[in-house]
Image (cartoon, rainbow, N blue to C red):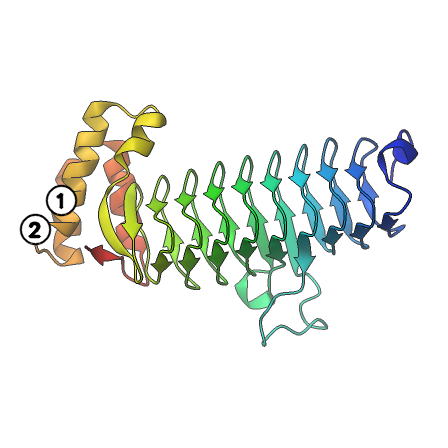
Amino acid sequence: MHEKGYLKLIDKHALIDPKAELDSDVSVGPYSVIGPDVQIAGGTWIGSHVVIKGPTRIGHDNKIYQFASVGEIPQDKKFKAELDRESALEIGDRNEIREYCTLNRGTQQGGGVTRIGNDNWIMAYCHIAHDCLVGNETVFANGTTLGGHIEIEDYVILGGFTLVHQFCRMGKHSFSGGGTAVTKDVPPFVMVVGNRAKAYSINKEGLKRRGFSPETIRALYKAYKIIYRQGLTINQAVETLKALSTEHTDVRYMLNFLQKSERGIVRPE
């Protein structure tokens, strides 16, 4: 690890393995424990009582608050440490990871890596399990829990205590209400609520805040009605959406998501 400024930023009560690699301006609070095979880039702040195990790579300007567990082995009975030596966690830049969050490494069966992108806001008591792929600028409200092998695309907002079943996908700009249990894929731009999750509408307010034009929002709502309000099967909805997708890029993205869905999608309210 770099020496310049190290003693000023690393509390004397922190325990850092000599094989960890921390940039010179990484800050680590008292009683935090950082193991070998951990790499932390500049500007990242680690609070007190944080445990980080490797292999874990953490990017620039992140904030990780007290009592978080980062890079621990997966909660997966199939995981064998001697076989999953390449198991890793990768965290991008400018993420905020609040108190008591647990982020696990990947498994050999899931590709070996749990990956979190940039600019995500992960509130207290969230759990991100092995082999999850989280995009950029998402919001995980308190108590959100992801099972293994889940993909959360960019700009997704998960309401408090949302539960997402393993192998599900949530498309970009989708939104879940508090206490939602997601057991199937959530298409892009769609709001879901309830246990079990049901489609409610397009995430209209979220799209407005992201600068989507009224024309695009109308097109997405039309696509939503084709999928959910006309009594069509998914295959029939896909065929009907093809014409609309030629005029609107975001509808085309929605169409591609449906075509790739392996679990099926959430159904309407």
Mark 1 neighbour class, 10 Å CA radius: few under 14, some 14 to 19, many 20 or more: some
Q: x%, y% of residue 139?
A: 47, 41
Q: Is residue 136 above or below residue 185?
A: above
Q: Does residue 245 appear in the picture of this structure?
A: no
Pointer 1 residue: 225
- 202 sits left or right of 34 in the view: left
Check contact, mark 1 vs mark 2: CB within 8 A. yes
- Residue closest to the far bottom: 77
Q: Does residue 83 appear in the picture of this structure?
A: yes
Residue name at image x 53 percent, y 39 percent: 120
For residue 230, which numbered disc appears in the image?
A: 2
Residue name at image x 86 percent, y 47 percent: 14
Residue name at image x 67 percent, y 67 percent: 84
- 237 sits left or right of 265 in the view: left
Q: Is residue 121 above or below residue 18?
A: above
Q: Amino acid at mark 1?
A: Lys
Q: Please identify the quarter of the rendering in which residue 269 is found.
A: bottom left
Q: Please, what secondary structure does the residue beneath circle 1 have?
A: helix
Q: x%, y% of residue 100?
A: 63, 53
Going from the N terminus, do you reach mark 1 or mark 2 first? 1
Q: x%, y% of residue 93?
A: 62, 35
